């Protein structure tokens, strides 16, 4: 996770790629159920914009859990 001066952080590209592999839909409902984020947050992530540090921490945990339960 990279920090930004505006109290936001950028997720590493690898984490965003993991999310793209794990995503089940691109609606508010699907993104919220899968990652706990809105469509607007999804668009921010894909555009490389910063998000709140607390959201980044929560996403890291969710992605690790989903990745561990997702057979390759």
Image (cartoon, rainbow, N blue to C red):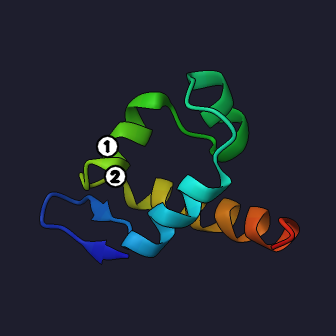
C-alpha separation, residue under disc 2 versus residue under disc 1: 8 Å
Disc number at residue 51? 2
Q: Relative to residue 18, is residue 44 depicted above or below? A: above
> Which residue is situated farthest in the left direction here?
5
At horizontal 57% and vertical 65% (from top left) the residue drawn is 18
Residue 8: horizontal and vertical position, in percent?
Answer: 26, 58
Q: Is residue 20 left or right of residue 29?
A: left
* Residues packed near mark 1 inside 10 Å, few (<14), some (14 to 19) or many (20 plus): some
Residue to which mark 1 is pinned: 44
Disc number at residue 35? none
Q: Earlier in the sequence, mark 2 or mark 1?
A: 1
Residue 19: horizontal and vertical position, in percent?
Answer: 56, 57
* Residues packed near mark 2 inside 10 Å, few (<14), some (14 to 19) or many (20 plus): some
Callouts 2 and 1 close, C-beta under 8 Å: yes
> Which residue is situated farthest in the front direction here?
72
Residue 30: horizontal and vertical position, in percent?
Answer: 67, 30
Q: Is residue 13 left or right of residue 4?
A: right
Dot 2 lies on which element? Answer: loop
- Relative to the observer, which residue lies in front, 27 or 60? 27
Quarter where residue 32 is shown? top right
Q: Relative to residue 24, is residue 3 depicted above or below? A: below
């Amino acid at each position: 996770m990279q920090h930004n001066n505006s109290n936001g952080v950028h997720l590493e590209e690898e984490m965003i790629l993991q999310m793209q592999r794990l995503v089940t839909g691109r609606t508010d409902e699907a993104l919220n159920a899968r990652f706990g984020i809105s469509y607007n947050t999804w668009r921010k992530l894909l555009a490389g914009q910063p998000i709140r540090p607390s959201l980044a921490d929560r996403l890291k945990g969710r992605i690790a859990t989903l990745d561990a339960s997702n057979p390759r």
